[in-house]
Image: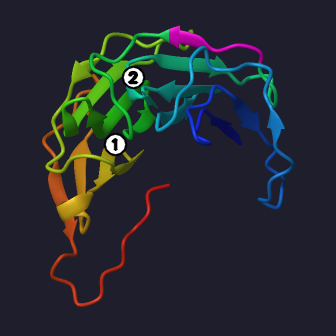
């Protein structure tokens, strides 16, 4: 298990890791040798092909930097690298890596909450290609997201917190238009699902 950045009164550069035991518990946390080159909190995380990504985040203002690290040796790691930056500084976004593409969903820019989705190809060396705009989610701000079986699922926030959206993921990484998969706003008993 890995964690990076954060805020303990101010944004942080540190990264930590812990062993996941066979029974699902975690071992003791240890500080990684590598630190982010600049302090960050509220960034988006994703993992793909033995690499972890820390995307955007905050350090007084929303940031554009995208960091990645090779985790193939397991445990500690010694250095972060940077790859293609976001077009606009974004914090509190969700990130999902799926079938060779990285997706960044929603979040907050200097202009406010957004519902845009951006995607980039994940190259074999871990770098990202150019970011492109995909279809937007009919919600904005902090959203949870996951992907499975060729679909991107997004849980709404704010006034849309009772809605779950989905879009088909095309072979080229682009998305279909989002549709409401489930609307629980009229349910007498509301259970908020969680994205894992």
Q: Is residue 124 visible?
A: no
Q: Label 1 neighbourhood size at 10 Å, few (<14), some (14-19), many (20+)? A: some
Q: Residue at x 60, y 14 (%)?
A: 37
Q: Earlier along the polypeptide chain: callout 2 or callout 1?
A: 2
Q: Residue furthest bottom?
A: 188
- Label 2 and label 1: CA atoms lie apart by 30 Å
Looking at the image, residue 30 lies above or below residue 163: above
Q: Which residues are magenta?
A: 78-82
Q: Going 18% across and 76% down the picture, which residue do you hit?
A: 185
Q: Position of residue 30 (x, y in %)?
A: 84, 37
Residue at point 64%, 15% (across, down)? 80
Residue 5 appears left or right of 91: right
Q: Which mark is residue 150?
A: 1
Q: Is residue 159 above or below residue 2?
A: below
Q: Is residue 105 visible?
A: yes
Residue 155 image-quadrant placement: bottom left
- State the residue position of label 2: 63
Residue 122: x and y, percent? 45, 18
Q: Secondary structure at mark 1?
A: loop
Q: Are marks 2 and 1 in contact (CB under 8 Å)?
A: no
């Amino acid at each position: 298990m890995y964690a990076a950045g954060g805020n303990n009164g101010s944004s942080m550069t540190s990264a930590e890791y812990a062993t996941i035991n066979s029974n699902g518990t975690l071992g003791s946390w240890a500080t990684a040798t590598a630190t982010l080159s600049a302090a960050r909190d509220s960034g988006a995380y994703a993992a793909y092909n033995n690499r972890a990504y820390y995307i955007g985040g905050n350090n007084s203002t929303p940031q554009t930097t995208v960091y990645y690290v090779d985790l193939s040796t397991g445990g500690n790691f010694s250095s972060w690298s940077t790859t293609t930056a976001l077009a606009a500084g974004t914090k509190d976004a969700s990130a999902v890596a799926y079938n060779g593409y990285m997706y960044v969903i929603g979040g907050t820019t200097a202009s406010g909450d957004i519902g845009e989705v951006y995607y980039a190809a994940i190259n074999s060396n871990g770098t990202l290609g150019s970011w492109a705009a995909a279809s937007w989610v009919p919600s904005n701000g902090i959203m949870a997201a996951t992907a499975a079986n060729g679909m991107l699922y997004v849980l709404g926030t704010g006034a849309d917190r009772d809605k779950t959206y989905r879009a088909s993921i095309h072979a080229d990484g682009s998305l279909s238009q989002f549709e409401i998969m489930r609307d629980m706003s009229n349910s007498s008993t509301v259970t908020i699902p969680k994205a894992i």
